Amino acid sequence: MQAGAAVGAAAAAVLLAANRRRQAPLVLAVLAVNEIPSGWSAVPKWAPPSVGGAILIAAGAALEQRRRDLSRLSRSVKAMR
């Protein structure tokens, strides 16, 4: 369980550092990847597909928002003419 906590802490540090645009996330990500095999057996079989699905849903929502923004911008530019 300690390996899982280490991976979780490393993942949180990577996300925090990436949010602040630091270069350290790469080093932390490498360290976290080295710890994954030791704790992989503790991960439920449904967890990786769930995380993948959540990432795909978030990416789709972001894409739809950008498409809506582009459509709104296009309408605004056409209205200026």
Image: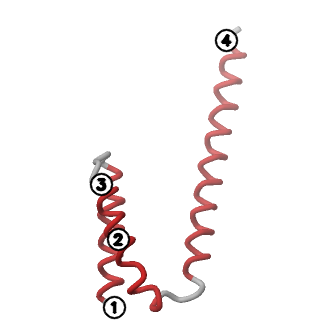
Alpha carbon of mark 2 to alpha carbon of mark 4: how far?
52 Å
* CB under 8 Å between discs 3 and 2: no
Q: What element carries label 2?
A: helix
Give x and y (percent) for residue 11: 36, 68
- Mark 1 Cα shell of 10 Å, populated few (<14), some (14-19), many (≥20): few
What is the quadrant of the C terminus in the image?
Answer: top right
Write down the quadrant of residue 50 in the picture. Answer: bottom right
Q: What amino acid is at disc 3? A: Ala
Q: Earlier in the sequence, mark 2 or mark 1?
A: 1
Residue carrying label 4: 80
Q: What residue type is labelled 1?
A: Met
Q: Name the residue under label 1.
A: 1
Mark 4, secondary structure of its residue: helix
Compared to 19, does 67 lie above or below?
Answer: above
The residue positioned 60% from the left and 54% from the top of the image is 59
> How far apart are labels 3 and 2 at the CA level?
14 Å
